[in-house]
Image (spheres, rainbow, N blue to C red):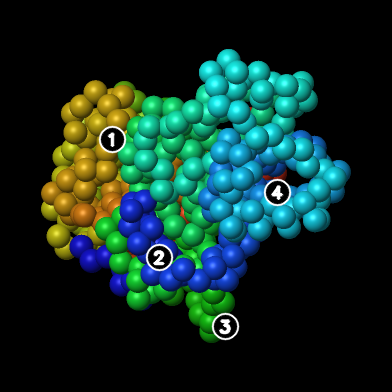
Amino acid sequence: MSFPLLSECAYLHPVLTSEESQVFEGELFRGNEALEWKAMNHAGRSIADQALLDIREALGDAPIHNLLLLVGKGHNGGDAIIAARHLLNRFPDAKVKMVFPSGLSHLRLLAHKSLDAFQVSHGEQLKYLSLRQGSKDGVEAQIQSFLGSESIDLCLDGILGMQFKPPLRSPIKELIECVNALESIQCRIAVDVPSGVGDNSDETRFRADFSYATGIAKRGMFELQNRPAVGRIRYLDLGFFRPSNLYAKISVLSDGALGFRKALRKSQVHKKKFGHVFVLGGSAAMPGAILMTVRAAVKSGVGLVTAFVPNSIVAEAASQIPEAMWCGLPEIPEDGGLALEGLSQIRELADKATAWAIGPGMGRNPETATLIEEVLRLSRSPVLLDADALLPELVKMDWSNRACAITPHNGEFNRLLDRPLNDPVGIHDLRNFSHEFSCIALLKGSPTAIVVEDRVVYSCFGSPVLARGGSGDILAGLIGGRLAIPGANSVESVLQGAAWHGWSADRLARTQGQTSAKATDVLDFL
């Protein structure tokens, strides 16, 4: 299976180890402080812009009143200070408290320069504390006295960056432990990486709600053992990478992955130019899943959508989604699933499909699985298998003559491997599976991982608003529709669907919050 050419996929940026990142930045800046200062200001502004979006999930439209900065002596501290300056330009009544665990005298040149600029523009809004070394109780007393009883809307962690090597030392270790325990903080954002996370991480790590990878996404942020500390990853593209230096076995999607939505379509086109996706699934017992998949397919950009579903749900489905063509199939009496008898109807139309999306809501009746297996032998068009179609006998078919994408969550992937459902799925598991069975494996999660043989791409778009029934069915419809567009690269279609789905969920969460949304609300933000 071929991966998209990097010249066509410039939105894939490498994920590097901290050591590789230091080498890259050394070659990029070559000790030029003017360039480094320009990059620091770019990073600080980008952090502020992203924070203004993300904090809406916690505060809604309420302003920021109190901001806490944990400032190290290096560039991460400088980035955080510049970000705070931009945030205060947006919220001029806010107050800022900065904690310097290494003291002011140890600040490096550019970090000190950022602090000087902050004091000039917003000095009257600033209070700061230089920590004294001591016991945990002593550090905690200093922090409690400094912060008082006021709640903190936003905490920025800019203590340690990519040069960190364990163990954490006093008083940084005690500071992180103390701040992690504070219940008064509404939102916690780590600048570049959470302090304590690196190629090798400390047992004590700043626990972030969001981690902003500024310029370069660091490998340690994506390690399974660091997920509780990292929270949700945001990749902030600072323009460091060009197509000539993009190749990497592990990559992250930049905002450019959403560029396809902006392209104008030619004026003289018709619906068949944009493909025809066949959606197959549903049962009388679970009609909702297939409806959500079809809703998403209709909005994916594909020209035509045909849905093959049990006879009993056709009338209601067609009234809800008239844009799709609905084809009713015979049902299995026991559970209302798709009966093998319907194969002849599908065979008559199979050559019209430019892609298939199969599985949502279809149930696990062996007869339905046999039907799907026979259907997959009828066509050479790309296939997406999701939900109940994630069966070993289907996923492990011969895909040498077409693309197959699978979209399991952790439990579904373990079921394919016949492992305990709660076992954590690692990248090596995905790589081995994708390589052995020649499929595109998308593991849903935070972040989502897309694997093609030995290549790994992370999509950091998305929100816990997706942690509800139906969100995977919508993703299946989006990817199925993208796969169906003639001339599309199958891997790119999966990447686009993942990014689009997550990005829309982010917008939903910022507008409605995470709690009272429903899965289909995501469709309104595509």
Residue corresponding to mark 4? 84
Q: Quadrant of the C terminus?
A: bottom right
Question: As displayed, is residue 393 above or below residue 43?
Answer: above
Foreground tag (2 vs 3): 2
Res 406 visible:
yes
Residue 393's place in the image compared with 182, above or below, is below
Cα distance between the residues tagged 3 and 4: 47 Å
Q: Secondary structure at mark 3?
A: loop
Q: Secondary structure at mark 4?
A: helix
Q: Amino acid at mark 4?
A: Ala
Q: Position of residue 83 (x, y in %)?
A: 66, 52
The structure residue drawn at horizontal position 53% and vertical position 50%, both measured from the top left corner, is: 74
Give amino acid for label 2: Gly
Cα separation between marks 1 and 4: 38 Å
Label located before the other in sequence (2 or 4): 2
Instruction: Tell me where residue 202 sits by quadrant.
Output: top left
Q: Viewer-nearest of labels 1 and 2?
A: 2
How much space separates mark 2 and mark 4, taking CA atoms? 26 Å
Count neighbours of disc 4 (C-alpha within 10 A) and say few if under 14, some if 14 to 19, many if 20 or more: many
The residue sitting at 27% across, 65% down in the picture is 3
Q: Which residue is mark 1?
A: 425
Residues at marks 1 and 2, CA–CA distance in whole angstroms? 35 Å
Mark positioned earlier in the residue sequence (1 or 2): 2
Q: CA distance from mark 3 to mark 1?
A: 46 Å
Mark closer to the chain start, 3 or 4 = 4
For badge 3, the amino acid type reads Ser
Q: Residue at x 51, y 55 (%)?
A: 214
On the question of residue 298 being in view, the answer is no
Q: Is residue 252 left or right of residue 127?
A: left
Front residue (pair 422, 212) = 212
What residue is at 60 percent from the left and 18 percent from the top? 138
Q: Nearer the viewer, residue 480 or 320?
A: 480
